[in-house]
Image (cartoon, grey):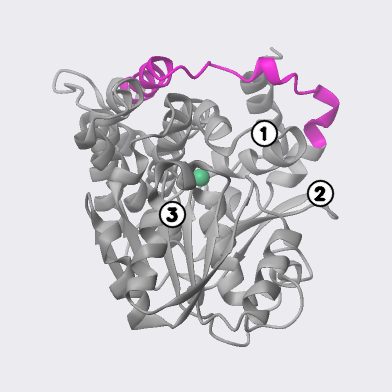
Amino acid sequence: MNKVTEFFAPGKIIFGPGGLSQVGVEAKRLGSKVLVVLGRSAMRKSGALDRLTHLLTENNLEYIIYENILSDPTVETVDTGASLARKGSCNLIIALGGGSVLDTGKAISAMVVNEGSVADYQEIEGKGRKFQHKPIPFIAIPTTSGTGSEATRNAVITNTKLGLKKSIRDLCLIPEVALVDPELTLSLPPHITAICGCDALTQCIESYLGKKSQEITNALALHAIGLIGKSLVKAVKEGKNLEARKDMAMAALLSGLCLSNSGLGAAHALSHPLGVYYKIPHGLSCAVLLPYIMEYNQPVVTKKLAKIAECLGENISSLSETEAAQRAVEKIKEILTAVGIKENLSEWKIKEEDFPQLIKGAKGGSLNNNLRDISDKDLTELLYKMTGLC
Ligand SMILES: [Fe+2]
């Protein structure tokens, strides 16, 4: 199909083991007073925070620390951080952490200079203000390999008042610098490594299969799928294997570039309400949903699924296209089993009477990007399968 495409990426991507050492120089280039956004205690314990603050001080930068950011950051968390940054006259945000911490830092960088609450800017029907002012510079330093938030133009924020998890989204939100140092992921526990890696895998597959797929992101997605096939199980089982961690960090970064430019699909659409109503970790619900969504889409993406099987190292030379597509789904299931993900979410006790609410929460951009149309009836059937209720 002839279509005109666009591709956006962070102003600068720094990648490689030991890359954290460049943060001082980058920060000095972009600001003078930093709000450092941090999760709970992992980066304090690992010594990464000390290294970061030492590098800032060495480069004559002042900083304030905003920490204890939890998973699924709320409107209040972002608004409080923005007010802290304004009071402290910060002109640069650095977030060091997982996807939730990066999303918080990204949202704060915009809210420091834009009026109102971040809730006013969420993609909620009838709302969704546009940012009037360019965010202050933002350096994203991921410590997990999953969301790819270091490369994306959106931040997912939970609006507890409305019971919604919705993005703020704008090109101006793409981080000025994505600093990806795989050494920071070496101490990540196996289960977190697994669900984050599955999130990246789902992002690559959904952007590759989606309506907005394009040549640049297709190339990135297929390369990342290959890296994940090669190294996810290894990263989960041998946490200190730097080579495997490097592959996963690259795959997550690429998955961010893919989703930011080509969107997602039905697995991500359903994963958001499951996070809001049942607090199911994002990567876990994506992982469980992925094979079901691939099977659902198979009639319209057979050729692409066959290519995925090939990228995952399967020999498809003697298989028909349909058989090769099915092999891709089977291979994904094998990977999920190997990293300890169950085939459904039965232990989360999702109730049938909540299905209408979950379906309502799934509506939006990601669902619209799914190549094969999905009716409410189809979503209900998918929910029966993935909840283990049938
Ligand atoms: Fe995701």
Give amino acid for label 2: Gly
Which region of the structure is painted magenta? 327-356
12 to 316, vertically: above or below: below
State the separation of the CA atoms marked 2 and 1. 20 Å
Q: Nearer the viewer, residue 323 or 153?
A: 153
214 to 146, vertically: above or below: below
Report the side of 23 relative to 86 (left or right): left
Give amino acid for label 1: Leu
Residue drawn at (77%, 71%) of the image? 127
Give amino acid for label 3: Leu
Q: Which residue of the protein is positioned furthest toward the bottom in this rendering?
A: 133
State yes or no: residue 80 in magenta.
no
190 to 356, vertically: above or below: above
State yes or no: residue 350 in magenta.
yes
Q: Which residue of the protein is positioned furthest toward the top in this rendering?
A: 390
Q: Can residue 212 be seen in this view?
A: no
Report the side of 262 relative to 323 (left or right): right
Q: Can residue 247 be seen in this view?
A: yes
Residue drawn at (69%, 49%) of the image? 363
144 to 287, vertically: above or below: below
Q: Residue 21 in the image: state x and y as whole percent.
A: 26, 61
Dot 2 corresponds to which residue? 163
Dot 3 corresponds to which residue? 49
Report the side of 13 relative to 372 (left or right): left
Disc 2 crowd rating (10 Å Cα; few below 14, some 14-19, many 20+) is few
Q: Residue 140 in the image: state x and y as whole percent.
A: 42, 62
* Residue 303 numbered tag: none
